[in-house]
Image: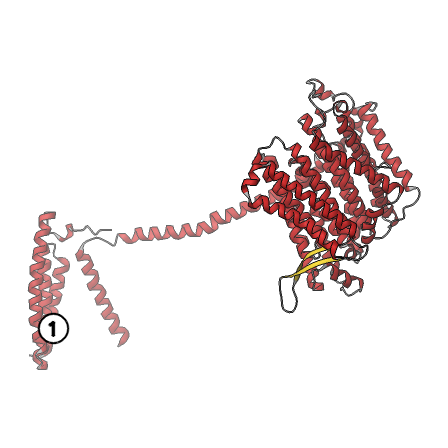
Amino acid sequence: MVDTGFFALAALLLHAFAFLLLALVPPLRRRGRPAALVSILCAAGSLAAAVQAWRTHGGETISRLVWDWLPAQGQALATVGVLADATSTVMLTLVGLVALLVQVYSLGYLSDEPQPALGRYYTYQSLFAFSMMGLVLSPNLLQLFIFWELVGLCSYLLIGYWYQRPAAARAAVKAFWTTKAGDVGLLIGIILLWRQSGTFDLTELRVLVESNALPLAGLSVITFCIYLGAMGKSAQFPLHVWLPDAMEGPTPVSALIHAATMVTAGVYLLVRTSWLFALTPDVLQIVAWIGAFTALLAAVLACVQDDIKRVLAYSTVSQLGYMMTAIGAGFAGAGLFHLLTHGVFKALLFLGSGALIHAVGSNNLSSMGRLAKQMPQTAIVFIVGTLSLAGIPLFGGFVSKEEILGGVWESGLVGPFVLLMIVAFLTAFYMFRAVFLAFFGAPAPAAAGHSHEAPHAHDPPATMAAPLWILAALSVAVGLYTFFIGPGPLGEAGGAAGAEVVSPAWLKPVAVGVAAAGILLAWLRYERRLVDPAVFASALGPIYRAALAKFWIDDLFEGVFAAGTLAFSRLVGWVDRYLVDGVLNALSAWTLTAGDDMRSMQSGRAQDYVYGVAVGLLVLLLWARWALA
Amino acid sequence: MGLQAYLTLAAVIFCIGLFGVVTRRNTIGILLGIELMLNAVNINLVAFARFHADVTGMIFTVFTICITVSEAALGLAIVILLFRIRRTVMADHLDLLKG
């Protein structure tokens, strides 16, 4: 099946072409809109190639195109190329789709930007899509790591797109460093694995694993190191702190980062190496527990955010926790399935929130309200996305979420299962909280004084609306297809990467019931205002306050790392100032005083010198007589 | 009288010359001291030439006398110039090299 590999390579290289063109031809980049068109055209071609690759991939057969790289004695140390199989091609399609829609959407969203900045934006976008596709198609871990780092770099560049804003610059650096902390683990893991197996190649590794030829000693350390990398990229506790701050970037960038690139990289890596992780059940346990804990933590945090993008950001962290739990439970296929459906509706939600922000001019839910009348289209697509995320039947996320819950139940992880059920309830609650606050009800009491109803708010222009409708239609289509026919091609991608899930019969009604309860509570609390907010606040007082403070995790990090670094710097500064400089200063001071003391010998009178010469000569003669005789 | 007596005389004259150089305040006195030291050397050279029956020492002495004369002329010229500029020839006032 060389065709599949060829199409996959074409999808990858089209983005590289767009990036190189924009990066190397400054006049084109500075013109802005033409640059955007080049980038969008390449993205469209790339999506077509990706779809073609997905359509033509041959089930279990794997299409590889590899070239030698890093020549060593005998054979090459590593290779570069593409590995197109069920998992990578479906992921490729998702990346291509979201990248294209985000680029089209950005054309409307960033229409007020100066042209050179727009060109820069599209340059980064192309590089981002290229990096993510390269990561997805990597046939070996070394190439994967290179693209992994490129993805990190691109997220840094795009989060800091408005680099004039201090908050954005700080968020970009935070994202870069936090993920970098995990990347170090990944690099160590890859190198250790190479020492153990002698290869970076995923296919060869899999053969080794399946023929039980890989020594198991120390493998837990390796898989845990690899998991650390995934933890950083996929925002798992405690490395999740960068993701909500990453909201400082433009909203389409958030959509891209959250739906298809960057954060999905960690989950994808674990799916890609799930056969390796299967050898180390203890690490899988850790993955599952941390995943479930992350899901709960982020869901609680999402309930108290006022910034609509932060609600969505925490919901992404929460859903990533879901996927990680599924992988930890041994059902990598379910994790990937949820990753794909989540990618579609999360992109939809983010782009929808972008439309809201574009119309209202503020990120805050408290300055929105009753927008459904003014922005009916946005309201419809946003609610479709919300229903998908909440796990309502017939919508995108229902089947994949249920598969995860079923898998976790089946593998006997009762603790994580309970956590995930609570999260399902909270997810429905906080998402509908956002919907009610933004689209329905009265303007919030806080905002009533200076009516923020934004009379000029209206649905977005076509370039922004079209991606929204496409994604909404896809969400519904995926939901209907998976509900009535079964996971189909999406599940097939999962099936290749993990075991089938047979969930118990009672799970479906319970999951729906939990989600419905969450929606009901949100309705009572925010639409009908039947529950007194004061009662709510006093009942959940401590948790509420803790959640508002992000459970002090950011503060803790600041305390440990920022203050620790500062203290260390002060120590080093003290050593430099007083020890290193001190020795030098003392030396120079001694030289000065010595010179000062010696100058009194220099009377300047010639006779004294003659006297000195005569006495010195005499002494020398006497000494010579005494010593040499 | 043996060689030793000449050498002793030369040493004594050398030391007197050195003493003069080191202690005289007047620059002309210092020049006189230097002349004495040079002549002490001359006595040595002539004495060795006489006692070793070698004429080389005497030839050297002639050279030394010539050089001494030139040196005295140069030295006096320098002293006169010095006096014109500094209005003094006292050695302990000439301490521009003082550190």
Residue under the point 80% across and 44% down: A338
Residue under the point 74% across and 31% down: A304
- In the depicted view, which residue is nearer to us: B33 or A190? A190
Subunit ID for the residue under disc 1: B
Q: Secondary structure at mark 1?
A: helix
Q: Does residue A351 appear to the left or right of A576 in the view shown?
A: right
Q: Extreme right residue here? A: A505
Display colour scheme: secondary structure
Q: Does residue B99 appear to the left or right of A87 in the view shown?
A: left
Q: Which residue is mark 1?
A: B8
Q: Residues within 10 Å of mark 1 (few under 14, many from 20)?
A: few
Expressed as whole percent of the image width and height from the top left, the position of residue A614 reads 19, 64
Relative to A370, is A265 above or below?
below
Relative to A618, is A131 above or below?
above
Q: Quadrant of residue A158?
A: top right
- In the depicted view, which residue is nearer to us: A304 or A32? A32
Expressed as whole percent of the image width and height from the top left, the position of residue A219 reads 74, 59
Relative to B21, is A500 above or below?
above
Residue A301 visible to an observer of this rendering: no
Q: Extreme top residue here? A: A449
Q: Quadrant of residue A358?
A: top right
Of the residues shown, which amino acid type is indicated by label 1? Thr
Expressed as whole percent of the image width and height from the top left, the position of residue A461 reads 69, 29
Expressed as whole percent of the image width and height from the top left, the position of residue A75 reads 66, 67
- How many marks do you count on the picture? 1
Q: Extreme bottom residue here? A: B53
Residue B70 visible to an observer of this rendering: yes
